[in-house]
Amino acid sequence: MTGSIGVPIYPTSTYAQDELGKPRMGYEYGRVSNPTRDRLETSLASLETGIGAKVFASGMAAVHAFCNLMKSGDHLLCTQNVYGGVPRLLDQVMANFGLEVTYVDTAELHAVEDAIRGNTRYLYAETPTNPLMALSDITALADVAHRHGIEMIVDNTFMSPYFQRPLELGADMVLHSTTKFLNGHSDGIGGAIVCSKREQVDKLAFVQKAAGAILSPFECWLVLRGIKTLPVRMKRHDENGRLVADFLNTHRRVRKVFYPGLPDHPRHELAKRQMSGFGSMIAFETGSLANATRLLQYLRVCILGESLGGVETLIAHPATMSHAAIGEKGRQAMGITDGMLRLSVGLEDVEDIIADLEQALARL
Ligand SMILES: Cc1ncc(COP(=O)(O)O)c(C=O)c1O
């Protein structure tokens, strides 16, 4: 209406109606719809080449909304090595409502096919995974799912639509923690599901209205603001990520580096095919909890903290942070060790990030 370059924030709980039963432009109540939220949902749908999107109060609220598409007695297949909050929700909350879940290595198509049952409704895949950076072939998985009449949802948080677009590869829905690269500034929590079919959008709109875990207009605006710089940020994240991974990979105190951009990553060829960049998420093995603890003490530029995808470099200890909830046995099964650290390489001068890691590693 005004040509304002910034998208307006509509902080309103309700809307004036001109006549009984005739809400203006369809806006009735803030939980059901909001113009700032509509704008973000349109933007996310466009970025992921979907037909619509729905945003939620957090990434986990988006996963929960997705679970609400199922009912008691339904079966879900889920990537084994997912973000720790997902099994916490599935095993400790959704299981109480009769949802059945099987965790499977989605890199192994036969394992996925063997785990499908008559009551399987969805395949939930995360690629690359958190924190091991394991990759699954989205096109091949979607083929398996569709042959069995199952829909597939992909958590695309680590790559963002700038580097990977699962719907174009055959997935049916895409999930994001917008908290990460889409927001990009570590100043908001949010989640989204992008859909390829009208029916999915309608069902998730109903979940927004019925369950109410919507994203606030201000948080929507923060994500819209983040999206404006997504391409420049992702390019720099990727450049810095590659250089930091190369540095760690040749350092004598680092036992192993998990980064899809390294030629010795087991799915490097798939990474080149399915993603247009490798991103900035890197896991590496220091050998022991004592080494990891000491390294974290000495770092000055890399900040110890949960989360990822912001402008600043964050370093995390999956065993006691993101993957604490799955317990030691669960971590062992996944291959997450006490000596493993996960970096979300930020946008600082890469020389500063490498110098920081170098001085800390030298003191081990
Ligand atoms: C890959 C992935 N998916 C989902 C989530 C959950 O998102 P949120 O923290 O916004 O609830 C996270 C959080 O770290 C994540 O890393």
Image (tube, rainbow, N blue to C red):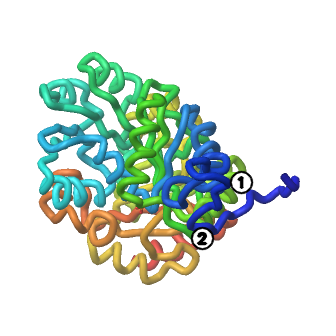
- Pick out the residue farthest to the right: 3
Mark 1 residue type: Thr
Which quadrant of the picture is home to ligand 1? bottom left
Q: How many marks?
A: 2
Q: Which x, y percent locates residue 101?
A: 16, 44
Residue in front for this viewpoint, 293 or 70 = 70
Per the image, label 2 sits on a secondary structure element best described as helix
The picture quadrant where one finds residue 137 is top left
Task: Please report the residue visible at 56 percent of the width from the left and 67 percent of the height from the top.
Answer: 13
Q: Please name the residue that numbered disc 2 is placed on.
A: 355
Quarter of the image where the C terminus is located: bottom left
Q: Is residue 320 above or below residue 61?
A: below
Q: Is residue 319 above or below residue 35?
A: below
- Pick out the residue farthest to the top: 147
Q: Please name the residue that numbered disc 1 is placed on.
A: 229
Mark 2 residue type: Ala
- Pick out the residue farthest to the front: 20
Q: Is residue 117 above or below residue 59?
A: above
